[in-house]
Amino acid sequence: MAQRHAVVVGGGIGGLSAAIGLHRVGWRVTVYERAAAFDAIGAGISLWPNAQRALGELGVHPPLAPQRGGGLRTARGRRLARWDAAAFERRNGLPLGVVHRADLIETLCAELPASSLRAGVTVTSVSPDGLVRHDGGEVRADLVVAADGIRSPVRQAFWPSSRLAYSGGTAFRGVARLPEPQQLSTTWARGTEVGVLPLLDGRVYWWVSEAVPEGIRHADARAYLSAAYAGWHAPIPALIASTPEILHHDVFQLATPLPTFTRGRVALLGDAAHAMPPFLGQGGCQAIEDAVVLAAAMSTSDTVAAALTRYDAERRPRSQHVAQASIRAGAAGPLLRNRVALAIRNSVLRLAPSSVTSMVGGDINAWSPPSLPQPQASEPPTNPAS
Ligand SMILES: Cc1cc2nc3c(=O)[nH]c(=O)nc-3n(C[C@H](O)[C@H](O)[C@H](O)COP(=O)(O)OP(=O)(O)OC[C@H]3O[C@@H](n4cnc5c(N)ncnc54)[C@H](O)[C@@H]3O)c2cc1C
């Protein structure tokens, strides 16, 4: 049988993971990325045990920093709960891991033949029969994976009534280097969350989530944050002061879940399929899960159509459940503004045993990937058509 060819639209976490999975099960893969290079914005990403298992199945081992200590605090530094890393690991089999996004993308790219990676190519249209047009020509594929992100042009073309909704929160993010080693901390105040997660090499990833109306911008994000968080506990002011570049984005989610993730030979994957708010840190993790399930379905089904039916049946309920859980987590955490509810939440947290933190993410962490066939000893050289 001729080697089957998949075109992946978008070279983010989801698209690259899907390409690795398909390559592993014997497909020829071409990834089109409209940016000039395969790269990621300068921030970190948390990878929960479910995503770490999925990456392991893909044979991908990014430089993950395991989160071993720390806890949940108030703005003045009072501890609400200790992060019980041992209990988390006992319950989930793996620690919470954090990686710089650029390192994750680099690790993913290294698993693919260079000829599969086409940066600087914008896909302009995709047909259900597998015809992909881009700004340099066209190609016909057996499978098209639309991993083109939260504003997915492919989703908008096939599901024109799908809409994004503002999550209720805006996010600032950065990566800084401090002289002293740091530990995980999540700090909650009214309508605000500040997170601190150490990376492997002494750098620290941090974010600030604020429940504010959509569209608020600051001429100087650092000046704004430095003033707003000046009285907060260490190391928050120092992190803000020493971050070279601070990112600021309003956070969106799909307003209503999609009725299907597939159309003809096309599969939506990652944020394109199920954009969710980041309150459980699961958007990228779900994209990686999608990738393994898609590859497994392609390797065990007789036809692309049968595989896509299985992909949709497995991935839609799971990822939409996680998206709903993320929305609920935002309402009870970073977005909570009601003073009475805040006081009750903080009291409950103070009284709870530290092992309660092992339950963060709940059963979402328990997911295990389907098995992929072992890699073949020698892969034929890739010869992507474009
Ligand atoms: C503040 C914040 C914090 C987050 N924290 C976490 C976390 O801790 N853990 C976690 O798991 N998730 C987290 N997420 C979610 C995570 O970032 C996303 O779910 C994930 O990046 C989605 O990956 P993706 O590959 O689906 O999409 P993307 O990463 O958006 O990639 C899509 C790619 O497609 C390309 N593209 C688009 N259109 C075209 C086209 N026409 N032709 C060619 N290329 C195209 C884009 O350039 C882009 O590179 C967070 C999100 C936010 C906003």
Image (spheres, rainbow, N blue to C red):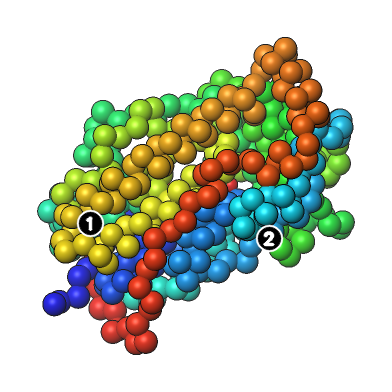
Q: Earlier in the sequence, mark 2 or mark 1?
A: 2
Picture quadrant of residue 228: top right
Q: Residue drawn 44% across and 67% down?
A: 58
98 displayed left or right of 143? right
Indicate the position of residue 301 as horizontal and vertical percent values.
Answer: 21, 62
Q: Is mark 2 within 8 Å of ligand 1?
A: no
Q: Quadrant of residue 316?
A: top left
In the displayed structure, 354 sits above or below 245; it is: above
Dot 1: element: helix
- Please tell me which residue is depicted at 35% across the width and 57% down the height of the picture: 293
Q: Secondary structure at mark 2?
A: strand
Instruction: Examine the rendered structure and indicate whether residue 161 appears above or below residue 81.
Output: above
Residue 382 lies, in percent from the top left, at 29, 79
Numbered mark located on residue 320 in the image: none
- Residue found 58% across the figure and 41% down from its top: 361
For residue 68, side relative to residue 335 (left or right): right
Look at mark 1 in the image and give the residue it sits on: 307
Residue found at x 26% / y 39%: 260
Give amino acid for label 1: Ala
x and y, in percent, of residue 381 in the image = 30, 84
The residue that disc 2 covers is: 65
Crowd class of label 2 (few under 14; some 14 to 19; many from 20; radius 10 Å): some
Whether residue 123 is visible to the viewer of this picture, yes or no, is no
User: In the rendered structure, which amino acid carries the disc numbered 2?
Assistant: Ala
In the rendered view of the protein, which quadrant contains the N terminus? bottom left
Percent position of residue 280, x then y: 57, 39
Label 1 beta carbon within 8 A of ligand 1: no
Where residue 220 sits, quadrant-wise, is: top right
